[in-house]
Amino acid sequence: MENVLENVTATAVWGSLAATAFLGAFMWVQAASDRQRRARFAAFGAVCWSLGVIDFLMPHLTHATYEVSRLVAVSCYAAAVLLLLSYPLVAVVATASALSLIGLVVWNSGHLALATTVTFPIAFAVAAIAHGWQFLRSKGYASCVLTAYSVAMALSCSIYYEAVKTADGRVITLGYANWVLLNACAVLFGWIHLPRELRGQAPVHVSLTHGALLFAAVVLSEAGVLDGFILHFHWPPTVYLASSVSVVLATLLLYFHHRHSLVIYTDNVTALLEQRTASLRVAQDQLARQNELLAQKLSEQERDLRSKGEVIDRQRRVELAAQVAGEAAHDIQNLLSPIGVYLSQIEAAPGNGACESVDRIRRQVRDLLELNGQLLALSRRGRVEAQPVELGELLRSVLERFPGMPVTLDGAAPAWIRGSWAQLSRAAANLVTNALEVEPRRVEAVTLRCGIVRTTETRKCHLGFLGAGDYAFFQVEDTGPGIPEGIRERIFEPFFSSKSGPHRSGTGLGLSIVAGVVDDHKGVLDLETGSEGTRFTLYFPPIPPPSGREEDLRGNATVVVAENDTPILDQCVKTLEQAGYLVFPAKDGEEVVRILQVQSVDLLVLDLQMPTMGGAEALFAALHLRPGVRALIHTSYVDSKEETRLRALGASDVLLKPASPRELLRAVRRALGAASLSPQ
């Protein structure tokens, strides 16, 4: 008989642990699916598992540790019920603290076993009150069942101490069996329906009458159970069994009375409808988001079209100005060229005392020629021969044109593009000049950079759109005060200038030429400006580095370079001397003639527009002094008619200024009659 009782007791204990573990796992599943109440379900699941773990570890714990652990756990159970039912956090914490304090007070009085006997009924009574209040508000089936069973469990816990005192194994077995029955009914008929009720999705509502009947039946039946194995215990426990059956029957009666509603939910029809409704809501949300994205894309496309329209309009204005500038500049060039000759004649006149005035006039003419050169560059009517250009080499040549200026090259990774060295060099020089002339304060530094950059998405730049891909670029960055917002959209217009003061160039064409060069090379220009400085970045389609054998561009001929622009003259002389040529520099045509009178020369490199005597006149004189001398024209602008005339005189090639070092050396080799070299 004792073995049977032990087996029944063990089965009852394990059944209680299983019900508690199932309830904890069920609550964690709800926590995973209900984001709004995730913390509440998770906390309740944790408390359920802590109660089960404590009972599971009971053989390995001291009696005091076991009782204190249960006391704290059941206090947390009542608090977790309040938290699950959305009671304020203050009430939750106060409940847990008060129950723990009550248990500790009883324990300190010397009644350790009595501490849990007092705390457990109070905890379940608190839970019953919370469930009862929830039932009065929602009329929910789960709240109705849990209210009745929480009271029944409170009654069952209240006789725990008396049952243990009897030291009768049969009484303890019946007590554990009753506890398992209450736990199982509470879980199967109450707890598994509560999450839906809390979400407002419970399909079953219980009237106050039915709720009161269930409450009375469960509580009275539980009172009969307690009476059957405590107050009037006898074997076999007829009263106990009858009362236990009454508890189950009362619960089943309420269940079957509402079975039609429960079956609907059990068959997942309601859940299916809810899922379909949720799917429709999700689809509506997705459609709304798609509509928003479509509206956003349309808005972006409208902005892009407006921006492209502005770019096209700007290009039209530039083209119109360029056409007018080109037509006017050619005539102005022809009118200015003879002035240098007249000034030389005035200086050579005997007894002339106007040398200082002549120098001033010559400087003014030089400025006018520079302005006219800008107009000619804007017109872009000259021949453009596309060739491989290495941007680092280009920027180094530009840097040499600003000696003594705060201009540095910071990083020049290899980057090759196909284009016009002359146009790209002029664009870079214009950007540097523009940066150096910043007012009201001078810049402290201008920095040049170049390399390859990769973009991952299309973005709008100041001039044009930069698609995803690899780009060769060069930058010109200054430390000036930035470009005011009000004029940023006008700085690329021809003849617009915001500069003032003694350092301004006054042409208003520099950035217009930059925009034209970018457009000619199918590039994109981006502008970043602020109080700390301004950065212009020019992007171009890259090309692979030229392959093939290295060209031998060295020579040992004698060359005269005539150029009135000192930086360009110095650069040409340096390039030729490094290649092995003997070079004689000249500032104008008259100096060329003087050199030819005393020196045997193989080749002339002539600028067309020079003071005193231009390149064409110098070539005429050279042909008389040194018949058969070869010539190469290096000029800012030449039209097709004049180029034909120069070639008829014997000019082997015409280079647009400034030519790249490689371009100049190739032209010199061709002019000297060397065999044609394979192009890179």
Image (cartoon, helix red, strand yellow):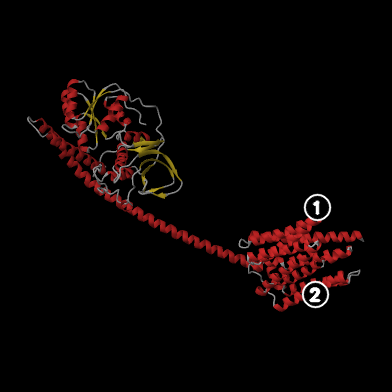
Label count reads 2
User: What is the x, y in percent for residue 362?
Assistant: 16, 36
User: What is the x, y in percent for residue 468?
Assistant: 44, 46
Look at the image and tell me in which quarter the N terminus lies. Answer: bottom right
Q: Is residue 332 visible?
A: yes
**C-alpha separation, residue under disc 2 versus residue under disc 1:** 37 Å
Q: Please tell me whether mark 2 sits on a helix, a strand or a loop.
A: helix
Q: Nearer the viewer, residue 559 or 210?
A: 210
In the picture as drawn, the residue positioned furthest to the right comes out as 1
Please indicate whether residue 314 sits to the left or right of residue 241 in the image: left
- The residue lying at 31 percent from left, 22 percent from top is 580
Q: Is residue 22 visible?
A: no
Q: Which disc, if any, is residue 123?
A: none
In the picture as drawn, the residue positioned furthest to the front comes out as 109
Amino acid type shown at disc 1: His
Can you tell which quarter of the image residue 581 is in?
top left
User: What is the x, y in percent for residue 112?
Assistant: 80, 61
In the displayed structure, 624 sits above or below 70; it is above
Residue at image mark 2: 220
Amino acid type shown at disc 2: Leu
In the picture as drawn, the residue positioned furthest to the bottom comes out as 209
In the displayed structure, 127 sits above or below 468; it is below
Residue at image mark 1: 60
- The residue lying at 85 percent from left, 63 percent from top is 164
Look at the image and tell me in which quarter the C terminus lies. Answer: top left
Can you tell which quarter of the image residue 215 is in?
bottom right
Q: Nearer the viewer, residue 484 or 656?
A: 484
